[in-house]
Amino acid sequence: MDILADELAQARASGAVFSVLTRNAPWGLEFSGTRPLTAHLLLKGSGWLELSDGPPISVRARDVVLVTAGTPYRLVSAPGTPAEPISEARSAGSTACEPEAVILCGAYVIEGSIGDSLLRALPRAAVLEAAQLAPRHAAAIDLLAAEAATEGPGQQALLDRLLDLNLVYTLRAWWSRPDAEPPGWYRAGADPNLERVLQSMHANPADAWTVTTMAAVAGMSRAAFSAHFTAVVGQSPARYLTALRMRRAEDALTRTNAPLSRIAADAGYRNEYAFATAFRRLHGVPPGRWRCQTRDLPVSR
């Protein structure tokens, strides 16, 4: 099992391009910062990313920018340039026939606690320079730019799928940086023994896992496995398993009307009472009440 693919699928991660704008300097775009994850690419030209805190960040052609939710931020041709809200910019459309800048903006829908765990592994703004992109990632950006420059049947679907590709490539590249803080399961991917265990756990979280059975899958002694797993992943095997099961249970509570007994069994608990006890310990409320409270909350887009 590909754990990154599984996590993205569980989080219902998908992207949609919502604007491709042409501009001549001076130009500026302001974003609310409320979307869970937004992507920006300057397909042509250069500019600056201005966050509410910290100095402006230079953005050049074909650099990839991912911004997680927070306060409003701006993309501008030069620091301090006045910016128009993106909603107004979209209504106005492109304003340059021979543009100095072509700005693509897209948004990713990433939902649930599984999505939250992915987003927590990213900084407020992740900027990958074009020179740092893997060849296949650069080729995908080239294709995205070429498609954005023309019109044809199915264009929006093509742009959206290419934006999905960009997310996977960007996560790979960002989490491979020495200064990044990737999820523990991603770090474990560099260790064949741990990767084998995690793949099995993600594929079958309801199995009767113990540290002893995990160690057997890894081909290690129980003590050596437990110490190594904790050092690499950042939490003990038992805590990781509990968190994995709870994320799956939270997903089922949010997205389905399945009874608690079914959710408990699918999450690996012997009955719904054991599940409710573990759930209350984590959330402070029983799963039924959590389900009602969560469904009453608006979904961010």
Image (cartoon, grey):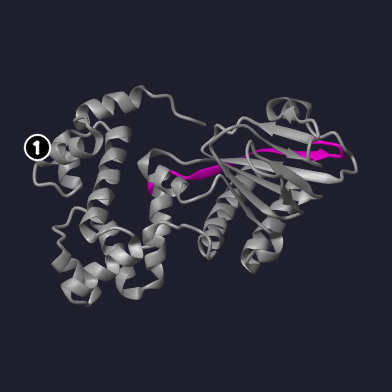
- Residue 82 relative to residue 178: left or right: right
Q: Which residue is located at x 55 percent, y 59 percent? A: 174
Residue 74, compared with residue 48, is above or below; it is: above
To which quarter of the image does residue 98 belong? top right
The disc labelled 1 sits on which kind of residue?
A: Tyr
81 shown above or below 66:
above
Question: Extreme front residue here?
Answer: 54
Examine the structure image and report whether residue 26 is included in the region drawn in magenta: yes
Q: Is residue 174 above or below residue 104?
A: below
**Residue pointed to by mark 1:** 273
Q: Is residue 11 visible?
A: no
In the visual, does 67 lie left or right of 9? Answer: right
- Please tell me which residue lies in front, 45 or 266: 45
Q: Residue at x 51, y 38 (%)?
A: 36
Going 52% across and 31% down the picture, which residue do you hit? Answer: 301
Q: Which residues are magenta?
A: 10-27
Q: Residue furthest right?
A: 98
Q: Residues within 10 Å of mark 1 (few under 14, many from 20)?
A: some
Q: Position of residue 91 (x, y in %)?
A: 74, 25
- Say whether residue 27 is left or right of residue 166: right
- Direction from residue 31 to residue 36 in the image, left or right: left
Residue 66 part of the magenta-drawn span: no
Q: Secondary structure at mark 1?
A: helix
In the current view of this chain or complex, which residue is farthest to the top?
296
Residue 17 visible somewhere in the drawing = yes
Q: Nearer the viewer, residue 119 or 107?
A: 119
**Residue 31: percent from left, percent from top:** 65, 32
The x, y position of residue 185, in whole percent, is 36, 60
Q: Nearer the viewer, residue 90 or 160?
A: 90
Residue 246, given in percent of the width and then of the height, sits at 25, 44
Q: Assign the N terminus to one quadrant of the image.
A: bottom left
